[in-house]
Image: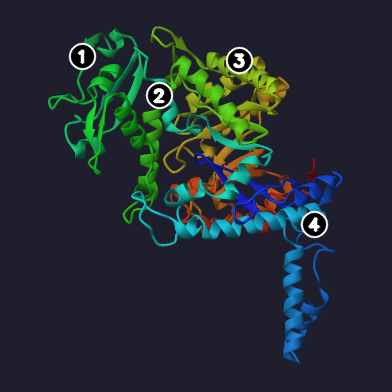
Amino acid sequence: MWAIWQRQSNIVIFMLDGMGVLCSTLKDGEEAPDSEIKEIQREKPRSSILKMPQSGRPGTRAKEIWRLAIEKREFDTPEDYDKALQSLQLAERKTAFDAKAEDLASEVEKKAAKIVQRIRNYDWENPHGESVDAKDLATEKRTQGEHFLGNVDLINDTKLLKIAKRMPKGAHLHIHFNSCLPAQFLIQQARDIDAMYIRSTLPLTSRENYTASRISFMVMTPHEATHVKGEEKETYVPLGDVTDIDYVSNRWMPYKQFQRQFNFVDENHTRLSGTTGAETWLERKMLISEDEAHGCSQTGRGIWEKFNYRTQMMKGLFAYESAFRNYTKECIKDFVRDNIQYAEIRPNFMATNSLKSDDGTRTIGNEGIMNIINEELHRTMQEIRSKGQYFGGMKVIYCTPRSFDRGKIEIALDECIDLKKKYQKLLCGFDLVGHEEMGNELRHFVPEFLAFRRKCRDQKLDIPFLFHCGETLEVGGKVDGNLFDAILLNAKRIGHGYAVARHPILMEIFKEKKIAIESCPISNEVLGLTPNIAGHNLPVLLANDVPYHPYLTISIK
């Protein structure tokens, strides 16, 4: 039994059977009887290392009845057919990736699984069966396999999610750092920042412009807000007022002034005004709606363009010291609240992604960013321990855009080595990020990657490649080809790997080399790779033991 749990756009997949964790809530929402809890608690803890089944190898397939039936090509009676069918189904179950764990499950594990299944059955009827719309009017029953964006309100009300939040998640390994916390967190951080400025592509003078406008933020000095650098000299540009009909596109406006003047009536005829109204509107602008993601005219590139706009809008709210520090600290605490034991975050490292001091007068480069992460990690870890909580730790994957040219990638790789020397325990890998179809393929940078490997070897540094690749529906294109490059470049893990399921030879190599896949079903759904969660290829990878690990360790405490 598997549950899929979502943090922002990122997925943690974990097994409910065999974890030795029990929720005390039953199907009807009542507390489980004390006798059930006590009975489970009295059972002795155990720790087992279980050999994983090896599909297609001796000892893992039932051969007798169903193989004989196939060879015979006929059945004497319906009973013989039923026996062959049961034998074939049993053989299939025995080759499942979790077959051994299920076969050797203890009584407490089986009991926990039954309770969780009862709770899942309850969730299928409530709240899905009794869902209401925004006006509290009853709607038709929504099923579990519908779009995440259309069902997230119901998911948040399920008892299964409450169990999932309490269960230990060994690691969260696919985390774009600027998308970990709700947009509201960064918006509220900016309330009292005097040096924060806002601009728009359109004057905010009509409902249409409020919808179509593109908003960006930046912390800077008043001089920077009113001067544009040219090749030879600076040009003075006056501040603008985004609420004025004569507003000139992309002129900066002090954010505090924007909050004071904000006044907007939305499509529901609700008036939004002042700081609270401005923050509500901005939060809505940052979120992708179900209609945007799955509209009948939407394309893969179209939704990526909308996704990139959201990250660009958030960039300025993330790029000053106090917000970055508070965000780092709160992100770690959020991991603890969700019982995530270990995490690897992916900040973007590039010259234009530096932080500013809160007054805009000082720039903090990539080394300074690493230092802030390191400081906040240690401070927050001390706070976590003082409360008797547990968090195993956090590391950083150096990320830079795949849209860069070879010269910039070489500089980034060299900086990655320098940062690894200074933060050996913190930096754990290198990745290229961004839309694969619009960026450079991995093979474009092979000379730089090979030189990087030699430098790491000569300096006795371990910086594995953890590439985003194969995030595509195409076969034979450059994005699909990144899977081949990731293998030859000895990637330790890959992000998404959606196309792997279409390559049987590559699947075998992934198993042989134990290349792990960071699967992100909800992200893949929102960005158009699968129509819904039920159509995702993760079950195909699991059924083929990709990636294959010969041993499964189960610890019950």
Amino acid at the residue labelled 1 = Val
**Mark 3 — residue?**
375
Chain-order first, disc 4 or disc 2: 4
Query: Disc 2 or disc 1, which is closer to the eye?
Result: 2
Q: CA distance from mark 4 to mark 2?
A: 49 Å
**Mark 2 — residue?**
188
Amino acid at the residue labelled 3 = Glu
Chain-order first, disc 1 or disc 3: 1
Q: Nearer the viewer, residue 393 or 498?
A: 393
Q: CA distance from mark 1 to mark 3?
A: 39 Å
Query: Disc 4 or disc 2, which is closer to the eye?
Result: 2
Chain-order first, disc 3 or disc 4: 4
Judged from the image, the secondary structure of the residue bearing numbered disc 3 is helix
Dividing the picture into quarters, in which one does residue 319 lie?
top left
Chain-order first, disc 2 or disc 1: 2
Q: Name the residue at 55% across, 34% down.
A: 175
Q: Name the residue at 52% across, 27% down.
A: 347
Quadrant containing the C terminus in the rendered view: top right
Amino acid at the residue labelled 2 = Gln
